[in-house]
Amino acid sequence: MGNKLGKMVISLKNQIVLFIMFSLLQISFLDAQDIANKKIYKPIIKENEIGKIYSFAGSPDKFVLKKVVKGFPKKRTLTKLRFADENDTYVIKVFGDDNKYLYSIGVGNPFYANATHIGYEDSKVMGGLVNSINLDITLPMNIEPTKFVFSKRNKTGILNDIQKIELN
């Protein structure tokens, strides 16, 4: 009786191992198929890389694409580029082919100018609102956006789309 029980336990153990191996093999096969659909695009390029520079002019409720050039980004532009987070008042969503969402770039609140002048460190007001801006974003050369969607965060923290700019 003990010998049969031992064989049953070993057989059951082998079946469990085979089941786990088969499951892992199937999961890895499915992941390999979807890898082309799950590309991660990096939104930030280095200072010495050539990228596409998209220049926008904007007011708090309207943005216009002024020009697109290929070149080296300014260091000031690169320090502002990052993925969007909950602290950003304005966000630029980047879409690729077939209206596929690529990522969101956080631009903070470009309509608030910070005053960082010497002598005003103790001031209660360290800036103010501006009505118009010029905004540059630089994307890597391998990214081919078809649409930009500008969104603004409301007082409850929800992003509302304010404008879509289609690229030809």
Image: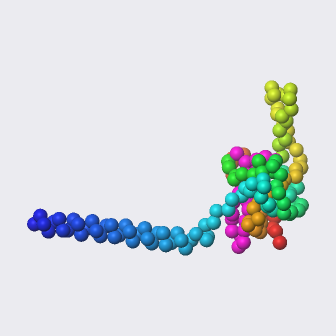
Q: Can see residue 72?
A: yes
Task: Point out residue 25 in the picture as x, y percentages from the top left corner.
Answer: 43, 71
Q: Is residue 4 left or right of residue 100?
A: left
| Residue occupying the far front of the picture | 48
Does residue 56 show up magenta in the picture?
Answer: no
Looking at the image, residue 53 lies above or below residue 114: below
Q: Is residue 141 left or right of residue 19?
A: right
User: What is the magenta range?
Assistant: 87-110
Placement of the N terminus among the 4 image quadrants? bottom left
Task: Point out residue 26 in the picture as x, y percentages from the top left corner.
Answer: 45, 72
Task: Point out residue 31 in the picture as x, y percentages from the top left corner.
Answer: 52, 69
| Residue situated in front as seen by the camera: 127 or 22 | 22
Q: Can see residue 62?
A: no
Give the image quarter of residue 46: bottom right
Looking at the image, residue 120 lies above or below residue 15: above
Q: How many marks?
A: 0
Does residue 92 show up magenta in the picture?
Answer: yes
Residue at image position (61%, 71%) is 36
* Colour pattern: rainbow
Residue at image position (73%, 67%) is 142
Residue at image position (75%, 52%) is 81
Placement of the C terminus among the 4 image quadrants? bottom right
| Residue situated in front as seen by the camera: 46 or 40 | 46
Residue at image position (82%, 32%) is 125
Give the image quarter of residue 16: bottom left
